[in-house]
Amino acid sequence: MAEDASIFDRAFEEIELIGRHIEMLKVTKRMQPIGIIRLSEELGIPKHKVRYSLRLLEKDGLIIATNEGAMVSDKYEEFMRGVSAQFESLIDRIETIKKG
């Protein structure tokens, strides 16, 4: 890591990645089945990043790969209901650290 890199850089990168995954899930739900090229176009994200996200989402059981393209699994609704709670937990943790 570069000398002038912030100790927060990795955290910001992870938040961006989480945002990309969530947006990809929403677009997939709306347009399913959807292929990598179409997802890339819809999200304005390079295909290699779409592939990476799809791989992780499939590993977590949130995306199902089909011959026609990606589809959300039956875990989607429960996951999306929990997103706000997960963000609140992150915010609470950050607030605790700030008060330190």
Image (cartoon, helix red, strand yellow):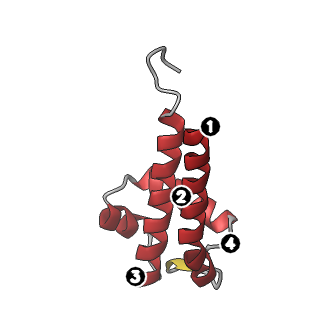
Q: Which residue is mark 4?
A: 61
Name which residue type carries label 3.
Met
CB-based contact (under 8 Å), mark 1 and mark 2 = no
**Mark sitting on residue 15:** none
Q: In the image, which is nearer the foreground, mark 3 or mark 1? A: 1
Name the residue rendered at 68%, 64% in the picture.
Answer: 59
Q: Is residue 3 above or below residue 63?
A: above
Ranked by sequence position, the earlier of labels 4 and 1 is 4
Q: Amino acid at mark 4?
A: Gly
Real-space Cα separation, disc 4 to disc 3, in angstroms: 18 Å
Residue that extends furthest to the top in the rendered view of this protein: 3
Tag 3's secondary structure? helix
Is residue 78 in view from this perspective?
yes
Percent from the top left, x then y, of residue 60?
68, 66
Q: Is residue 55 above or below residue 64?
A: above
In the picture, the disc for residue 31 is 3
Q: Mark 2 and mark 4: span between their CA atoms?
A: 12 Å
Question: Considering the image in quadrants, where does the C terminus appear?
Answer: top right
